[in-house]
Amino acid sequence: MAAKYIFVTGGVTSSLGKGIICASLGRLLVARGLRVTIQKLDPYINVDPGTMNPYEHGEVYVTDDGAETDLDLGHYERFLGIRTSQQNNVTTGRVYFDVISKERQGTYLGKTVQVIPHITDEIKSHVVKLGESEKYDVVIVEIGGTVGDIESLPYIEAMRQLRYDVGRSNTLSIHLTLVPYLAAAGELKTKPTQHSVKTLSESGLSPDLLVCRSEYQLDEGIRRKIAQFCNVDIEDVIASLDAESIYEVPLLMQNEGLDARVIQKLNLPSKNADLEKWKEFIEKIKNPSYETNIALVGKYVEHHDAYKSIVEALIHGGAMNDARVNIRWVQSDYLTEKNVAKMLKGVSGILVAPGFGDRGIDGKLSAVKFARENNIPFFGICLGMQCAVVEFARNCAGMPEANSTEFDEDTPYPVIDLMPDQREIQDKGGTMRLGTYDCKLIENSASWNAYDQELIEERHRHRFELNNKLREKLVGNGLDIAGINPEKDLVEIVEIQSHPWFVGVQFHPELKSTVNDPHPLFAAFVEAALQNEKENLKQISHQKQPA
Ligand code: GLN
């Protein structure tokens, strides 16, 4: 069967949750036995989001093959249980970069290079590459931005053309819009949706299905009105109401018949959706028996999207333990040795987040020390792991001015240092140690116990690493090495095994946690946090006793 394509555009305003709608539809189609992938087309001119500030863009999601991508790819992986790659995220920057490179190589044989056909052809080639890989029955294409934006136009035009290239019956256009409630009028308003569909149709891509975000249920009258004005059947007006958790959206969409309509319109083979495991997961996150407070210490905490995958992995790890994880967002800039006990009072676990640059480092070091000295479960990720090594060096291994050379090039004890193959690199984009690398676990470590296997693969995004020249001195003073990259002998995991649970990882485990396959380290960390507060465990009503 040739792949079918579903184009998803958004209208009226940004932040309607297009990524979650795509991921939810994807989940429903996977549950019906189809092979699905999702591709994100981003209209910005950066070649990838890797060079963007987290305040600007949120988390940079890294795929197995080392692509720095949009955080929506994280939702796709978590919801669908699939692996994405560079192929799943295309930006205007990348498209132009490739077209201009080809122009320089003479590929266009003297032609004038133009948006149509050269840019649109390049966009289409990225989309059909996934469709023609024969790996998928359905390719969902999420078009970033909002209909009407100048920079989205080439994408809409490319999709318009693609409908003819691959046959109209093989494509579907879904438009996500907003139906706002006007308190003064006491009514839901359909006009913004009408305008948005009109704008989209002017570009030649009329929607087959409308997903309408709304705070209130759409009654029959409203649905009829939208259907009439927007040229769709009433069954093709799908309401998407606010959900308590993003993980409920697939079920809400199923109730509204989104997947059934898609199956019917695309004439896809399908069995009944198997969502039993998904429903069990939702039950666990909605009605957990326990709860625990975990501090997330980082410098971008005002912007939760900067830590998207960590937040989701904590939810997954919580569900594994029948527990709700309450995150206390702790701004590392404000954390000091003096106030750390107060700021972290009552938390049962401390997670020090990834990051770049020296802002907030002292606060992170105070958090590590507090966790280490007070036997509070500690999880350090990437920069968080590097902070754990610096703190240990300074306070437990007789290296008082130890530091990472990222923050002090002249430190007498560079316990964290630039990786040798990073030294000559000048360019910032796509040049870190990126993507999946092997890690061999050391027997009987906390990590070994969590993974329950010897060889693991995890994703990376960093330039610095534990300095092997100072490794012996650290180990001699009680730092445990729990994971090594066998190929280059790099330290990937440090632990303190005399502590209840103290684990620092150079990689990003949060990127691989999914609903159906929660990450073992997050599950173990939440378990350790629950264990830590066992005596004064706050039981939610009707609860069983902890084991
Ligand atoms: N800044 C550190 C490095 O480049 C850590 C990176 C991270 O936390 N992702 O090694």
Image (spheres, grey):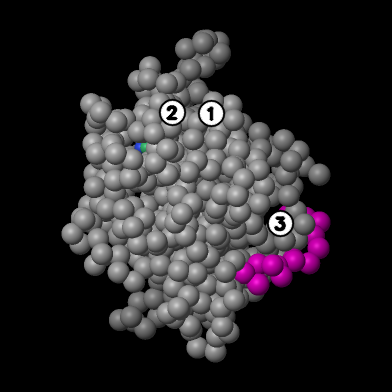
Q: Is residue 83 magenta?
A: no
Q: What amino acid is at disc 2?
A: Asn
When the figure is inspected, residue 323 is found, relative to residue 510, above or below; the finding is below
Which element is circle 2 on? helix
Residue at left offset 44%, top offset 56%: 499
- Looking at this view, name the residue that lies furthest to the left: 338
Which element is circle 3 on? helix
Figure quadrant of residue 408: top left
Q: Quadrant of ligand 1?
A: top left
Ligand 1 is within 8 Å of the C-beta of the residue at disc 1: no
Q: Which residues are magenta?
A: 264-281
In this view of the protein, can residue 322 be seen by the observer? Answer: yes
Residue pointed to by mark 2: 468
Residue at left offset 38%, top offset 17%: 424
Rendered location of residue 104, percent (x, y)? 47, 12
Q: Say the numbered circle drawn on residue 506.
A: none
Mark 3–mark 2 distance (CA, rounded to whole Å): 45 Å
Residue pointed to by mark 1: 489
Rendered location of residue 204, percent (x, y)? 54, 46
Residue pointed to by mark 3: 30
